[in-house]
Image (cartoon, rainbow, N blue to C red):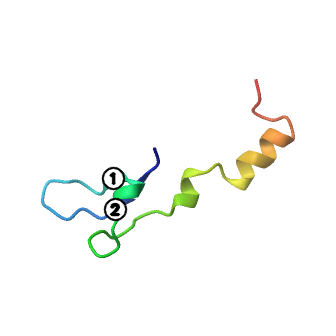
Amino acid sequence: MNTVKVKPWGKDQGEFVLINEDDFDPKVHELLESAAKDKPSSRRAAKTEAGEGAE
């Protein structure tokens, strides 16, 4: 199950709140990061394809 970081809506929640992606409601939540950030970056993918960082 994928999760997203949203802006906290109450006191003592810290810098962000982690919720299930399916529970995200733009009327209630403010997204702090996009789902694309959860995927490997193109830089990491390029290193893997080049054989760098592979075990």
Q: Is residue 52 left or right of residue 30?
A: right
Residue found at x 29% / y 76%: 27
Dot 2, crowdedness within 10 Å: few (<14), some or many (≥20)?
many
Residue to which mark 2 is pinned:
6
* Residue type at tag 1: Ile
Numbered mark located on residue 36 in the image: none
Q: Are marks 1 and 2 in contact (CB under 8 Å)?
A: yes
Residue that extends furthest to the right in the rendered view of this protein: 50
Residue to which mark 1 is pinned:
19
Q: Is residue 5 left or right of residue 28?
A: right
* Earlier-in-chain disc, 1 versus 2: 2
The relative height of residue 30 versus residue 11 in the rendered view (above or below) is: below
Residue 33 image point, x, y percent: 46, 62
Residue 13 image point, x, y percent: 19, 54
For the C terminus, the quadrant is top right
Residue found at x 73% / y 52%: 43
Dot 1, crowdedness within 10 Å: few (<14), some or many (≥20)?
some
Residue 11 image point, x, y percent: 12, 59
The relative height of residue 47 versus residue 54 in the rendered view (above or below) is: below
Asked whether 52 or 7 is in front, the reply is 7
Under tag 1, what secondary structure? strand
Give the CA distance from mark 1 to mark 2.
7 Å
Residue found at x 33% / y 51%: 18
Under tag 2, what secondary structure? strand
Residue that extends furthest to the left in the rendered view of this protein: 11
Asked whether 40 or 47 is in front, the reply is 40
Residue found at x 33% / y 68%: 25
Q: In this rendering, which labeled residue sits more in front, label 1 or label 2?
A: 1
Residue 20 image point, x, y percent: 37, 51
* Residue type at tag 2: Val
